[in-house]
Amino acid sequence: MKFPLYIAKRYLFTKSKNNAINIITIIAAIGVFAGAFSLFIVLSGFSGLRDFSLSFSNEFDPDLKALPAVGKTIRITEAQKNDLLEIQGVEELSQIVEERVILSYKSKTNPAYIKGVDENYQRVNEIDSAIVFGTWLTKSEPQVVIGNGLSRLLDVGTFNYQNLLKIMVPKPGKGQITLTNIQNAFNTRQTIVSGVYSVNEELDDKYVFTHIGFAKDLLGLEEDEFSGVEFKLSANQDAKEISGKIQKILGDQAIIKTRAELNEALNKMLNSENLFVYLIFTLVLTIALFNVVGSIIVMILDKRENLKTLHSLGATPKQIKNIFFYQGMLMTTLGGIAGLIFAILLIVLQIKYDLVMITPNLPYPVQLKFMNIMVVMGTIFTLGLIASYIAAGRSKKALA
């Protein structure tokens, strides 16, 4: 092994008398460098965009959420609530009520979802940090916090006591609604808008928040009826393990979902985009590694007489093949490492100095992740291994 590796290093680092071979080798090395550099930059960019996209839903979605397995509500006793709080790793919980309603303001109406939350909700989620106008809910009067999108659609502002927001929800029952009984078909409450929040377009057009007591009165729910329970976990806790303990307490009436499962569609979309971009840049890197194959083949042709001499001195065909295999692996590994180092430096500079900006106040999000380093090195090593093996196989013809 030492003999082929020694010759491979000599061939790689020693200047050839044929200037064309030197140029081809440099081009091949630059191709590997550029491929590793661009692949890591793209993966780091997508990691940053992924975390940036999920950060908006993190303000709204809890670490764990218990939802009804059947129907719209689950019943939770005070004893069950205490048992849930005693689970190691559960830092806080919030009971919520959620239902589809109709919002009416002046002459405008729009469907939405009302979400009644208790006093612990702010300790479970960070929704109050998303308030852009007004304030979060207070206990002084019936209030709602409305999404920015709904606020624009209804043209509603905060603390307008002359024009209250009307919230309507159909009464439970059977039969058709006619023009004669339309007023009696809905439970209706009026409330003041205390604040406007902004998380993302989907949520801003969907939810209005209010006190859980107000929501239960509107929906006609009993004291122990809830639409779900949201949990905040302590740092570095196993969500799957804790969800199993929660399931034992709540039984078959509830299903437990993690934050990733609550955003399953978004996660699938982000993962698919990341995979497609990785495959595209891997294809580009594969094309770049054809230069390595060409470089080694040209080197074999140039060193044909030297190879015959080595063979006459006792070198086996396998050892001669290994010379060029190691040369290809050295070229791809060194080029890949160099490209990776420069890419890491650029990502660090972007994180520290905000070199590229999306808006004057928003730098392009990037993330420096060890997994991305391993993916790039694994890709470079695998493709380099294949390219070097294919090219080194041509050495047998040089001995003929």
Image (tube, grey):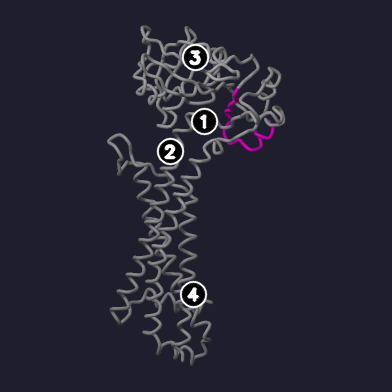
Give the residue at mark 1. 61
Spatial distance from mark 3 to mark 1, Cα to Cα? 36 Å
Earlier-in-chain disc, 4 versus 1: 1
Q: As displayed, is residue 212 above or below residue 393?
A: above
Disc 1 element = loop
Q: Residues within 10 Å of mark 3 (few under 14, many from 20)?
A: few
Q: Tag 4, which secondary structure?
A: helix
Secondary structure category for the residue under label 2: helix
Towards the viewer: 154 or 1: 154
Q: Is residue 315 magenta?
A: no
The reply to whether the C-beta atoms of the residues labelled 2 and 4 are less than 8 Å apart is: no
Q: Left or right? Give the position of 317 relative to 290.
A: right
Q: Are marks 4 and 1 in contact (CB under 8 Å)?
A: no
Residue 47 vertical placement versus 11 (above, below): above
Observer-nearest of 180 and 400: 180
| Disc nearer the start of the sequence (4/3) | 3
Tell me if residue 336 comes above or below residue 369 in the rendering: below
Residue tagged 2:
53
Q: Amino acid at mark 1?
A: Asp
Q: Which mark is residue 389?
A: 4
Disc number placed over residue 287 in the picture, else none: none
**3D distance between C-alphas at marks 2 and 4:** 42 Å
- For label 3, the residue is 182
Q: Which residues are magenta?
A: 227-245
Callout in the foreground (3, 1) = 3
User: Residue type at mark 4?
Assistant: Tyr
For disc 1, the neighbor class at 10 Å (few under 14, some 14 to 19, many from 20) is many
Q: State the quadrant of the N terminus.
A: bottom right
In primary-sequence order, the first of circles 3 and 1 is: 1
Q: Is residue 235 magenta?
A: yes
Relative horizontal placement of residue 36, taking residue 245 as reference (left or right) = left
**Nearest-to-viewer mark from 2 and 4:** 2
